[in-house]
Image: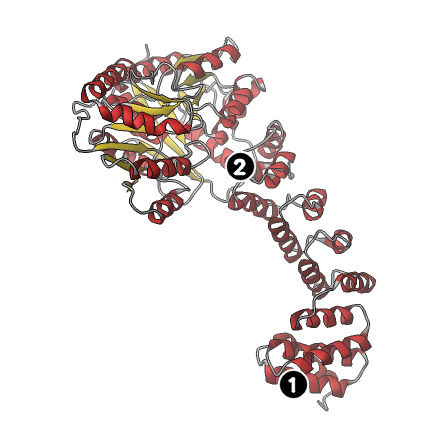
Amino acid sequence: MPTRIRVAFCHYGGNAISGPASWLVRMLPRLRALDIDPFVIRYATGDEPSLATQRLADSGIDTYEIQARGLAIEVGVQQVLQLLAERAPNVVVADHVLPVMLAAYWTRPAGMPMILTVRSDDDWYRRLRSEFLIGNPQCRMHGVVAVSDELANDVASMSPDDIATMQCPSSVPIPQDTAQWDDDTFHLVYVGRLESRQKRILDLTRALIEASISRPRLKVTLYGDGPQRDAVCALLAARRGHRVSYGGRLDSDRVIPALTLAQAMVLYSAYEGLSTALQEAMACGLPVISRRMRSGIAGIVEHLQTGYLLDDDAQLGAAIDRLSADRNDWQRIATNARRLAADRFAIDNAGRRWRDFLHRLATRRRPDEIRVPDIPEIATRLAAHCMAYASVNADEARLLAGFATHWPEPLQRFVHCETHAWTHRWSCIQQGFERKILRGDALRRLCIDDTLHIRLRSWIIREAVDRGLLGEHLACEMFADASVDWQLRRWTLYRLYEQAQLSPTTVRDAAAQLLEEWQEEDTAALYQRASLLELAGSHDAAVIAFEAVLDRLDGGDFRAGCHYHLARIALAREHVGDAGAHLRRCLALCPTHQAARSLLDTTRQASPVL
């Protein structure tokens, strides 16, 4: 076996509690004592610092950060390659960091082995397995580590023979102190990310509130952080009489002490790989209440042996009642859970297995230097790669918007999907605008698609107008489309008119179209109708309409606006004196009316008598 090898460990790494972050903090110092020289590459997709990276740096492990927020992914891949070329590791543990795995197009020819870590049983990991284990041979991984038996079986069944595989859980320390029974209180805890898609945290919070109201002994603490933190706190604040509290986020070294103060842990996930929190709880001698799921639970949480399995959500109360009813039964389950954890999850054993696996792959290392390509070459390669995805989640959508050289179909579907958060969908749209890939037919399809939510569609149209991307042809389609909000079409007409992007004929026709649909009778609507009459070239009717609005009002912005438009009509008729009078009245009512002041200055230059 070689003496020491250098290994790059990659992660996205935010500030939230997560199993991969805890694994890095615990595993890398152990590997350093086992012939491994580790360093960390954090591909940061947000502004928040990584506490895991900071703790590793404090322990003397080299850490490097690529700040990827707002960064086109082809630039991110290039920076990954530059870092790998400089540090020349024997092996790269890509974990599930997509830009690092995409760098395999250039690390593989150099003979630098790369490892995918499969941590969960969801669509994201399935696509990673499909793309990087059996996909294009030019970017295949050299090795794959699966955290559960089920995932390992799936990986083994699909991986080519030349890909090395290992099943190894994230693993945890086995503490000396264990959880103890309490006659007065049954303390149930949740530890993990506060998010809904996988962890179902809002459903869990509601269920625990109801359970605690009817069970005086039950006390519940929720630990963690994530996108649903504020929503969880709002649920807790909205109800009275319960005993559920939010305990904040926990650093990895505070998790086990917190667990030893409880009597059980609950896991309500829709899917898992092999939850680190579950391993930590069992190592502390905590029975685990968990929903049944295909991966990561079978053979670990055994019903009434190491925990309690729920066939449906309604059984949560019965599980709490069973585990809290009898001290001896609880102790039996707790002892079984701790024994299983010591046999299967001990981190020292996992460290030795990782060391052997890394040394096994390191023998394949060739001394070739990595070629770092230019951005166009990377972008061309990645644009073809991203089209292989049939559908995308929020993380993938953000990444695809960052490296596609055009607006790909998966992003079109992502924007339409109502199950994705507004902020994620709009973020991808903004990135598409910023990178100048959302235009042409892709933009047209979003603007005229009446199946897209009206608010999101309005945002897209307004952004396209402000960026000068709408164009006269698409504008004409939109003006004739009654599914587009009338006020939005009127606003668009005025903005494009002010930008001089429409021909006079288009302006008149669009105004006439909007006038045909006009139905409101309040003052604001009458003002808008008068403005459209002006744009349509019906000056006599516009003057009558503006004067009708003036008759309704004593002052204010509408009155000032009426005088401004009457001045424009007067100038179109070459009635300079009337125009000047209306402009002065407009400015008297609204001294900050910049358009009126500019028009008055221009008129004075042409007619000094004003």
Query: Mark 1 against mark 2, which lies toward the viewer?
Result: 1
Secondary structure under badge 2?
A: helix
Q: Residues within 10 Å of mark 1 (few under 14, many from 20)?
A: some
Tell me, yes or no, if residue 453 can be seen here: yes
Relative placement, left or right, of 281 versus 585 is left
Q: Identify whether 299 is placed above or below 182.
A: above
Amino acid type of the residue that numbered disc 2 sits on in the rendered structure:
Leu
Sooner in the amino-acid sequence: mark 1 or mark 2: 2
Residues 38 and 510: in front is 510
User: Which residue is labeled 2 in the image?
Assistant: 399
Residues 20 and 285: in front is 285
* C-alpha gap between disc 1 and disc 2: 54 Å
Relative placement, left or right, of 214 versus 517 is left
Q: Quadrant of residue 16?
A: top left
Residue 412 x/y as whole percent = 64, 38
Q: Are the two marked residues, 1 and 2, in contact with CB atoms closer than 8 angstroms?
A: no
Residue 335: which numbered mark, if any? none
Tell me, yes or no, if residue 600 can be seen here: no
Instruction: Looking at this view, name the residue that lies furthest to the top.
Output: 161
Residue 263 x/y as whole percent = 23, 28
Instruction: Looking at this view, name the residue that lies furthest to the bottom.
Output: 609
Secondary structure under badge 1?
A: helix
User: Which residue is labeled 1 in the image?
Assistant: 585
